Amino acid sequence: MENRTFAKLRRWAREGIIFILLALAVMWGVDQYRKPDLPASFSATPMRSIDGRTFDIAALSQERPLMIYVWATWCSICRFTSPSVDKIAKEGGNVVSIAMRSGDDAKLARWVEKKQLTMPVINDANGALSQQWQVSVTPTLVIVSKGQVVSTTTGWTSYWGMKLRTWWAGR
């Protein structure tokens, strides 16, 4: 009886590990398919946030990895991801966010204030930047180190997943 129970547990554990490995492989494949194809000069373009600050991706990513978070006010998944990105920014994380097709600066600023977000927000009001970067899915996270893309992922990502990606890029 005890051998039978142990055999069942071993089988369930093996099947669980296989399931997890398959799920990770599928997630990796989806990320590879949906990842943006950033132009070579993407980090050379200075960008202005809705509060008037200028951000230089190449300069920001020299000392430590930079997390670029592409999101939208109309994106339902972003409602769960944005608070985690904002928390990382509040903790001193190197974060810049780009709001894709989310209205003019004034409308976006009101939305950001309503949601109490403190992370820097660059407005891509007409989607030109996201189109140039070939970002077609929100949310998209791009980790940049020393001006080079190190990691990209799309869809929901946990707080710890973001922290891990940023840490891995800076090791």
Image (cartoon, grey):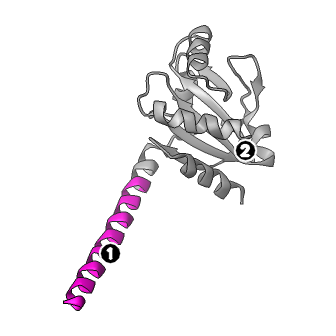
User: Does the stretch in magenta take in 20?
Assistant: yes
Residue plotted at (63% across, 46% down) = 143
Q: Position of residue 102 (x, y in %)?
A: 51, 17
Few, some or many C-alpha atoms within 10 Å of disc 2 (few <14, some 14-19, many ≥20)?
A: many
On-image quarter of the N terminus: bottom left
Residue at which label 1 appears: 13
User: Does the stretch in magenta take in 165?
Assistant: no
Q: Residue furthest front?
A: 1
Q: Is residue 169 visible?
A: yes
Residue plotted at (27% across, 85% down) = 6
Residue plotted at (54% across, 51% down) = 161
Front residue of 84/167: it is 84
Front residue of 24/82: it is 82
Counting residues from the start of the chain, the first of labels 1 and 2 encountered is: 1
Front residue of 64/20: it is 20
Q: Main secondary structure of the magenta part?
A: helix
Residue at which label 2 appears: 147
Q: Position of residue 156 (x, y in %)?
A: 45, 42
Over which residues does the magenta segment extend? 1-28
Q: Give the answer, above or below, for where 124 lies relative to 110.
A: below
Between the residue at mark 1 and the residue at mark 2, the CA separation in whole angstroms equals 42 Å
On-image quarter of the C terminus: bottom right
Quarter location, residue 26 = bottom left
Q: Is residue 124 visible?
A: no
Residue flagged by tag 2: what amino acid is it?
Gly
Q: Secondary structure at mark 2?
A: loop
Residue 85 located left or right of residue 57: left
Residue flagged by tag 1: what amino acid is it?
Ala
Q: Secondary structure at mark 1?
A: helix
Q: How many marks?
A: 2
